[in-house]
Amino acid sequence: MRREEEHASPDDAAALVNSVEGYLHVRAHQEDARREAEELCARMPWLTSAQAEDVTRHYVRQRMLLTRRILQTTADRAVELRSEYEARYATLRRELLKRHTACACAVLAGASAVAVLTGVLVR
Protein backbone atom coordinates (compact mmCIF):
# COMPACT_ATOMS: atom_id res chain seq x y z
CA MET A 1 0.00 0.00 0.00
CA ARG A 2 1.34 3.41 -0.95
CA ARG A 3 1.69 6.09 1.70
CA GLU A 4 -1.05 8.27 0.14
CA GLU A 5 -3.52 5.40 0.36
CA GLU A 6 -2.84 4.77 4.04
CA HIS A 7 -4.75 7.85 5.18
CA ALA A 8 -8.18 8.86 3.96
CA SER A 9 -8.82 12.52 3.28
CA PRO A 10 -11.09 14.37 5.70
CA ASP A 11 -13.79 14.42 3.01
CA ASP A 12 -13.50 10.64 2.53
CA ALA A 13 -13.65 10.08 6.27
CA ALA A 14 -16.69 12.35 6.61
CA ALA A 15 -18.44 10.55 3.74
CA LEU A 16 -17.73 7.19 5.39
CA VAL A 17 -19.03 8.41 8.74
CA ASN A 18 -22.19 9.76 7.07
CA SER A 19 -22.69 6.48 5.25
CA VAL A 20 -22.30 4.40 8.40
CA GLU A 21 -24.56 6.76 10.33
CA GLY A 22 -27.22 6.50 7.62
CA TYR A 23 -26.99 2.72 7.65
CA LEU A 24 -27.37 2.62 11.42
CA HIS A 25 -30.41 4.91 11.28
CA VAL A 26 -32.06 2.67 8.70
CA ARG A 27 -31.36 -0.43 10.78
CA ALA A 28 -32.78 1.27 13.88
CA HIS A 29 -35.96 2.17 11.99
CA GLN A 30 -36.25 -1.38 10.71
CA GLU A 31 -35.86 -2.79 14.19
CA ASP A 32 -38.45 -0.35 15.57
CA ALA A 33 -40.88 -1.37 12.84
CA ARG A 34 -40.21 -5.06 13.43
CA ARG A 35 -40.79 -4.64 17.17
CA GLU A 36 -44.05 -2.76 16.55
CA ALA A 37 -45.22 -5.46 14.12
CA GLU A 38 -44.41 -8.20 16.59
CA GLU A 39 -46.33 -6.34 19.32
CA LEU A 40 -49.27 -6.02 16.94
CA CYS A 41 -49.16 -9.71 16.10
CA ALA A 42 -48.96 -10.58 19.80
CA ARG A 43 -52.37 -8.91 20.23
CA MET A 44 -53.75 -11.27 17.57
CA PRO A 45 -53.13 -14.72 19.06
CA TRP A 46 -55.19 -16.43 16.36
CA LEU A 47 -52.50 -15.78 13.72
CA THR A 48 -50.36 -18.73 12.80
CA SER A 49 -46.58 -18.28 12.87
CA ALA A 50 -46.51 -17.97 9.10
CA GLN A 51 -49.29 -15.38 9.15
CA ALA A 52 -47.56 -13.39 11.89
CA GLU A 53 -44.31 -13.42 9.89
CA ASP A 54 -46.23 -12.29 6.80
CA VAL A 55 -47.92 -9.44 8.71
CA THR A 56 -44.56 -8.45 10.20
CA ARG A 57 -42.87 -8.43 6.79
CA HIS A 58 -45.64 -6.30 5.23
CA TYR A 59 -45.74 -3.92 8.19
CA VAL A 60 -41.96 -3.38 8.12
CA ARG A 61 -42.02 -2.77 4.35
CA GLN A 62 -44.88 -0.28 4.64
CA ARG A 63 -43.29 1.48 7.59
CA MET A 64 -39.96 1.82 5.75
CA LEU A 65 -41.72 3.23 2.66
CA LEU A 66 -43.54 5.74 4.86
CA THR A 67 -40.31 6.72 6.62
CA ARG A 68 -38.57 7.16 3.26
CA ARG A 69 -41.40 9.40 1.98
CA ILE A 70 -41.36 11.53 5.14
CA LEU A 71 -37.58 11.92 5.04
CA GLN A 72 -37.63 12.74 1.31
CA THR A 73 -40.31 15.38 1.85
CA THR A 74 -38.28 16.88 4.70
CA ALA A 75 -35.08 16.87 2.63
CA ASP A 76 -36.86 18.47 -0.35
CA ARG A 77 -38.26 21.20 1.88
CA ALA A 78 -34.83 21.81 3.39
CA VAL A 79 -33.43 22.36 -0.12
CA GLU A 80 -36.27 24.79 -0.90
CA LEU A 81 -35.72 26.70 2.33
CA ARG A 82 -31.99 26.87 1.75
CA SER A 83 -32.55 28.36 -1.69
CA GLU A 84 -35.04 30.87 -0.29
CA TYR A 85 -32.72 31.89 2.56
CA GLU A 86 -29.69 32.17 0.26
CA ALA A 87 -31.64 34.41 -2.12
CA ARG A 88 -32.86 36.58 0.75
CA TYR A 89 -29.34 36.77 2.22
CA ALA A 90 -27.94 37.85 -1.14
CA THR A 91 -30.61 40.57 -1.43
CA LEU A 92 -29.95 41.85 2.09
CA ARG A 93 -26.21 41.80 1.48
CA ARG A 94 -26.59 43.87 -1.73
CA GLU A 95 -28.83 46.38 0.08
CA LEU A 96 -26.35 46.68 2.94
CA LEU A 97 -23.47 47.18 0.50
CA LYS A 98 -25.39 49.93 -1.29
CA ARG A 99 -26.10 51.67 2.03
CA HIS A 100 -22.49 51.40 3.16
CA THR A 101 -21.33 52.73 -0.20
CA ALA A 102 -23.74 55.66 0.02
CA CYS A 103 -22.65 56.36 3.59
CA ALA A 104 -18.98 56.23 2.64
CA CYS A 105 -19.61 58.63 -0.25
CA ALA A 106 -21.46 61.02 2.07
CA VAL A 107 -18.60 60.91 4.60
CA LEU A 108 -16.03 61.56 1.86
CA ALA A 109 -18.11 64.40 0.44
CA GLY A 110 -18.43 65.89 3.91
CA ALA A 111 -14.73 65.52 4.56
CA SER A 112 -13.96 67.16 1.22
CA ALA A 113 -16.31 70.03 2.01
CA VAL A 114 -14.69 70.51 5.42
CA ALA A 115 -11.25 70.42 3.83
CA VAL A 116 -12.26 73.01 1.24
CA LEU A 117 -13.91 75.24 3.83
CA THR A 118 -11.02 74.86 6.25
CA GLY A 119 -8.60 75.68 3.44
CA VAL A 120 -10.62 78.79 2.59
CA LEU A 121 -10.86 79.93 6.19
CA VAL A 122 -7.20 79.36 6.93
CA ARG A 123 -6.02 81.62 4.13
Image: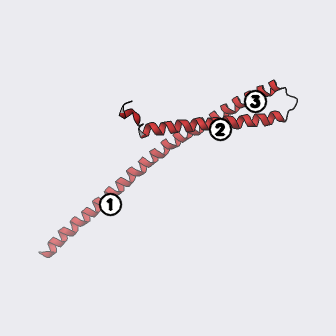
The percent position of residue 22, horizontal first and vertical second, equals 57, 37
Question: What residue is at 71 percent from the left and 31 percent from the top?
Answer: 60
Residue 75 or residue 49, whichever sits in front: 49
Judge left or right: residue 92 versus residue 35. left
Nearer the viewer's eye, disc 2 or disc 1? 2
Q: How crowded is mark 2: few (under 14 residues within 10 Å), some or many (20 or more)?
A: few
Q: Which of marks 2 and 3 is nearer the N terminus?
A: 2
Proximity of marks 2 and 3: CB atoms separated by less than 8 Å? no
Question: What residue is at 38 percent from the left and 54 percent from the top?
Answer: 96
Residue 76 visible to an observer of this rendering:
no
For disc 3, the marked residue is: 56
Q: How far apart are marks 3 and 1 (CA)?
A: 69 Å
Q: Residues within 10 Å of mark 3 (few under 14, many from 20)?
A: many
The percent position of residue 87, horizontal first and vertical second, equals 45, 44
Amino acid type, callout 1: Cys
Question: What residue is at 61 percent from the left and 38 percent from the top?
Answer: 25
The percent position of residue 57, horizontal first and vertical second, equals 73, 27
Q: Which of marks 2 and 1 is nearer the N terminus?
A: 2
The residue sitting at the front extreme is 1
The secondary element bearing badge 3 is classed as: helix
Q: Residue 28's mark? A: 2
Q: How far apart are marks 2 and 3 (CA)?
A: 16 Å
Judge left or right: residue 74 versus residue 108. right
Residue 110 or residue 22, whichever sits in front: 22
Amino acid type, callout 2: Ala
The residue sitting at the left extreme is 123
Residue 79 or residue 1, whichever sits in front: 1
The secondary element bearing badge 2 is classed as: helix
Q: Relative to residue 59, is residue 79 depicted above or below?
A: below
Amino acid type, callout 3: Thr
